[in-house]
Image (spheres, grey):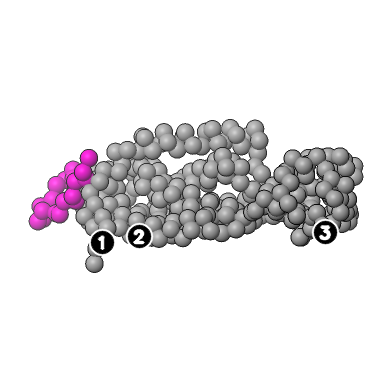
Amino acid sequence: MIRLFANANYDFIRWRRWAYGLTAAIIIPGFALFLVRGLNYSIEFTGGTLIQVHTAAPVGTGKLRAALDAAGIRDAEIQQFGDPTEYVIRARIAKGGAVADGSTEATAAAVDSALTRGLGAAPEHYTIVRTEAVGPKVGRELQGKAFLAIFFSFIVTLIYLAFRFEWRFGLAAVLATFHDILTTIAFIRYLDLEVSLVVVGAVLTMVGYSLNDTIIIFDRVRENLRKFRRQNLYEILNLSINETLPRSVLTHGTTMATTIALVLLAGEVLRPFALVMTFAIFTGTFSSIYIAAPLLMDIEKRWPGEDARGARAFRAAGSAAAPEPRAPQPTR
């Protein structure tokens, strides 16, 4: 059998500063854009009414907006959905700044009336395929629970890694995962993807996926710290990443092939999930190698852990026993 990267010996840690620069180039403009424009939340988070419309012929979003504006339905979100005759309209009818009771039926009726005047009578010129509604209170609760889910995932991860390894490993893993979330939010903002519960599910899946890869590398780091006590942490990190590289390439490659197929073949509902997951696989792999491992090295330099202190003492005192195996040196 062919095993990819079976004898990998690359110096990954050498490129950590370039990785930090690439990360900053993605996160900083994306965060600035997020502060200025925010995120495009779906109807599940904002509350209101979603109406899917099928037209007899392509009419364009401009004509639909003109019809809604003429009827007094301002600030409606209109998006082409699939083929040129499918559209999604997100609108709200408020009274006194708040959505009124029964506004779903009122909004749907108002949109139907506006489209009749702008496009012609239904069903000859258009058909309302579906109407969905979520109250603003439910939307705010969903938004809060999504953030709480991500926050508690951080806390549980930090506790688990502090117990399983050391708190230094947990801190590095959480910071790397926080990096993944920031880059994913920037990616969502750059593409102006609609943030729905499906996209939130992709972000949470990314958190678990990235943490899994980081923990696998850190577990090998811990083993090698005790096995190659003469080596410094720089060499141990490179060795551990290279040893787990075949597994990472196989797992991430097959998963990314699936998500790319979803991007190309799935419908509009699943495509945002597939796009976020495809990017998440990339950034999760990137952060495990170029963010989590270098952060662990920086943390260990400032607050040496038990394994690092033991290795230093071993090197300082020397070894009277048989020579210890030496880790392979990475290719620069």
- Percent across and percent down for residue 259 are 49, 57
Marks 2 and 1 close (CB-CB < 8 Å) = no
Q: Nearer the viewer, mark 3 or mark 2?
A: 3
Is 321 magenta? The answer is: yes
Residue 223: name its quadrant. Answer: bottom left
| Rendering coords of residue 122 (x, y %) | 84, 56
Amino acid marked by disc 2:
Leu
Which numbered mark, 3 or 1, is in the foreground of this view? 3
> Which region is colored magenta?
314-332
Name the foreground residue: 314 vs 264.
264
Residue sitting nearer the eye, 31 or 176: 31
Q: Of marks 3 and 1, which one's residue comes earlier in the chain?
A: 1
Q: Which residue is label 2 attached to? A: 250
Dot 3 or dot 2, earlier in sequence:
3
In the picture of the structure, the residue carrying the numbered disc 3 is 123
| Residue where numbered disc 1 is placed | 3
Q: CA distance from mark 3 to mark 2?
A: 52 Å
Q: Is residue 251 visible?
A: yes
